[in-house]
């Protein structure tokens, strides 16, 4: 099951916005450098309910075993070390979750362009049932 690695940060009072953005840019650059990172989002807090935490980082990993690979990766270690040097308070939580991606129920047809509205057949949208579909080159039963 996928894992979300979530960090809540409160930077030291002397750290300016430019330095914070450098840290966040370094975090974003980990995507593609650390193979187990599927996604990484980070930015400033927008809520007044964060208990003084000003920024957050959310990293999506494929499974719990990937967490140690991420934390120990040579590209991650210097980024984390520099970041924690400017942080007054840090809280981390790791959540395992079930991915609930809906199944793709579209049938791609050759030669079509799905962005222009052709080349994809959505059976339910066209009220097609298995009895009205026929193998390629054959006509449906009348």
Image (cartoon, rainbow, N blue to C red):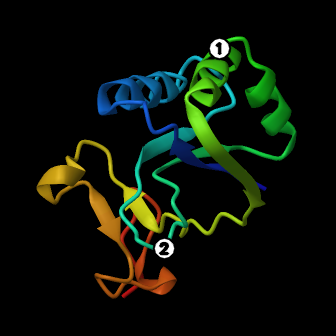
Where does residue 96 sit, x and y in percent of width and height?
77, 60
81 horizontally vs 127: left or right: right
Where does residue 41 sit, x and y in percent of width and height?
47, 44
Q: Tell me the quarter of the picture where residue 34 sits.
A: top right
Q: Tell me the quarter of the picture where residue 137 sits.
A: bottom left
Q: Under tag 1, what secondary structure?
A: helix
Few, some or many residues within 10 Å of mark 1 (<14, 14–19, 20+): few
Where does residue 17 sit, x and y in percent of width and height?
32, 33
Instruction: Name the N-terminal-most of marks 1 and 2.
Output: 2
Q: Are marks 1 and 2 in contact (CB under 8 Å)?
A: no
Q: Nearer the viewer, residue 85 or 107?
A: 85
Q: Which mark is residue 78?
A: 1
Q: Residue at x 40, y 68 (%)?
A: 47
Q: Residue at x 66, y 63 (%)?
A: 99
Q: Under tag 2, what secondary structure?
A: loop
Quadrant location of the N terminus in the rendered image = bottom right
Residue extending farthest front: 14
Q: Tell me the quarter of the picture where residue 57 sits.
A: top right
Q: Nearer the viewer, residue 115 or 98?
A: 98
> Is residue 2 something that shows in the picture?
no
How far is the residue under mark 1 from the one under mark 2?
A: 30 Å
13 horizontally vs 125: left or right: right
**Is the residue 32 above or below the residue 104 in the image?**
above
Q: Residue at x 47, y 63 (%)?
A: 135
Q: Which mark is residue 49?
A: 2
Few, some or many residues within 10 Å of mark 2 (<14, 14–19, 20+): few
Q: Nearer the viewer, residue 31 or 78?
A: 78
Number of marks present in the image shown: 2
Of discs 1 and 2, which sits in the foreground?
2
Where does residue 140 sit, x and y in percent of width and height?
39, 77
**Is the residue 47 above or below the residue 25 in the image?**
below
Q: Residue at x 63, y 33 (%)?
A: 37
């Amino acid at each position: 099951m996928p894992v979300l690695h979530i960090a809540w940060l409160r930077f030291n009072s002397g750290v300016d916005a430019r330095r914070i953005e450098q840290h966040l840019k370094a975090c974003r650059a980990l995507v593609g450098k650390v193979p187990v990172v599927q996604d990484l989002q980070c930015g400033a807090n927008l809520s007044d309910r964060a208990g003084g935490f000003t920024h957050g980082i959310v990293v999506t990993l494929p499974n719990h075993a990937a967490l140690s690979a991420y934390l120990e990766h040579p590209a991650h270690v210097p980024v984390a070390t520099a970041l924690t040097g400017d942080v007054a308070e840090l809280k981390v939580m790791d959540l395992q979750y079930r991915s609930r991606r809906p199944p793709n129920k579209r049938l791609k047809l050759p030669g079509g362009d799905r962005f222009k509205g052709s080349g994809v057949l959505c059976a339910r949208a066209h009220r097609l049932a298995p009895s009205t579909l026929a193998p390629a080159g054959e006509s449906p039963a009348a």
